[in-house]
Amino acid sequence: MSTVEQAVAQEIPKVQELGTTSAPLKSAAFFLGAYCKEYNEDFMLCKSESRDPAHCLKEGRRVTRCATDLITKMRENCLAQFDSHWGCLEQNNHEYYRCRPAERTLNNCMFEKMGLVKEIPGTPAGRKAIHEIENPVLGRQQK
């Protein structure tokens, strides 16, 4: 890192790492996308401006703070449902379709306690999203 980059990095407040593994992040992914949308978009815009990692430290730290805030709120409001869902993902190779019952209870809790709704981008208009189908017919999966 150059002297200028070090000076810039020192000006930007430090932020603690999120401190979670991939399963809790995957469980919270759609909620993180909605809750931290503005920060994520700013970060991606910044990254498109420059390939220099130091260029977007400020925006990246905002994303991390937002994610930390959401994970903390999820633990405060929906701990049992959150633990159940990410534990299921952990035990089932991170496959959403194997954890739909736990996902439904988490989605309900997140809506009731925090007003957040899971929305999957690209879901066709007028059709139920895959996680809302009560008895899905699972066909052969393409690898």
Image: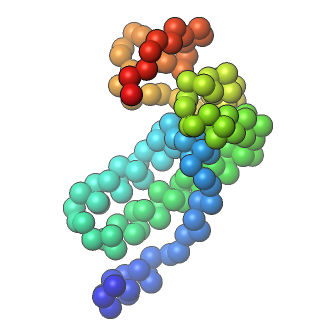
Q: Is residue 133 above or below residue 9?
A: above
**Quadrant containing the C terminus in the rendered view:** top left
What colouring method underlies this structural image?
rainbow
Q: Position of residue 45 (x, y in %)?
A: 28, 54
> Which residue is at a point 57% across and 37% down the rendered structure image?
93
> Which residue is at a point 35% across and 49% down the rendered structure image?
41
Residue 68 appears in view: yes
Q: Position of residue 142 (x, y in %)?
A: 38, 22
Residue nearer the viewer, 136 or 108: 136
Q: Is residue 55 above or below residue 36?
A: below
* Residue furthest bottom as drawn: 3
> Which residue is at a point 54% across and 21% down the rendered structure image?
131
Q: Position of residue 10 (x, y in %)?
A: 44, 83
The image quadrant that residue 11 belongs to is bottom left
Q: Position of residue 76 (x, y in %)?
A: 75, 46
> Which residue is at a point 33% across and 70% down the rendered structure image?
53
Residue 108 appears in view: no
Residue 66 located left or right of residue 88: left
Question: Tag count in the figure?
Answer: 0
Residue nearer the viewer, 89 or 115: 89
